[in-house]
Image (spheres, rainbow, N blue to C red):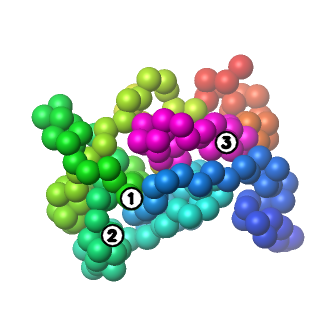
Amino acid sequence: MTQRAYCSSCHYPLSACLCAAVAPIYPQHQVVVLQHPSEVTHTKNSVRLLQLAVPETQVVVGESAADFAEIRQQLQQLGNAMLVYPESEAAASASTSAPAPRTLVLLDGTWRKVYRMLCLNPWLLALPRISLAVENDSAYCIRKAKRSDSLSTLEAAALALQQLQPDLDVQPVRQLLQALVDTRLARMPTNVRQRYRVD
């Protein structure tokens, strides 16, 4: 069997290379993604795209407190880190008075796995949080989600950065995601595409 060839830059198969759609952005805030191990090899993992779109993104794979001990220490030293995660109105109000964050922390995994990561890492819940103003359905239609307010990690990062830095143009990030979606859909048989609400 012939081994599939991959692009050395974007690491996607050459037949689905996304390099032409990559237009990196450099926000004022550092982006840190704590990624559940099950997401690393997932073919629909949007963190791979996020690293192309925001090159200074730091990804740490793990689940337990021991897995994240080093990044926890790093975040404590940097200070003013903020967790991107839904919260109650009371908590949201409290977050608005927190100092402007230097670092955005995102959790990458299914809702169930992210919840487990939070249970194993209560220090994350001590961070100020930013709730996202989700107005539209996720553009990442090729990956199903049980919750209507679910966004891919890439979309969540872009929206959070835009909320904190309104003058930042995050359209290149969204366009990269759309390029991936279009590439995947184009390769699907018509009957399969219909499952993803695509004409």
- Look at the magenta stretch and give its main secondary structure: helix
User: In the rendered image of this protein, does residue 110 appear above or below residue 42?
Assistant: above
* Label 2–label 3 contact, CB within 8 A: no
Gap in angstroms between the C-alphas marked 2 and 3: 28 Å
Q: Which residue was labeled with disc 1? A: 103
Q: Does label 2 or label 3 sit earlier along the sequence? A: 2
Instruction: Pick the quarter of the image with the C terminus.
Output: top right
Asked whether 194 or 185 is in front, the reply is 185
Q: Considering only order in the chain, which callout, 1 or 2, is on the residue closer to the N terminus? A: 2
Q: Which residue is mark 2?
A: 78
Name which quarter of the figure residue 96 lies in: top left
* Residue that numbered label 3 is attached to: 172
Task: Classify the position of the N terminus by image quarter.
Answer: bottom right
Question: How many residues crowd around disc 3 within 10 Å: few (fewer than 14), some, or many (20 or more)?
Answer: some
Q: Amino acid at mark 2?
A: Leu
Q: Position of residue 143 (x, y in %)?
A: 55, 41
The residue most toward the left is: 90
Q: Residue at x 39, y 50 (%)?
A: 110
Instruction: Tell me the kind of residue under disc 1.
Output: Thr
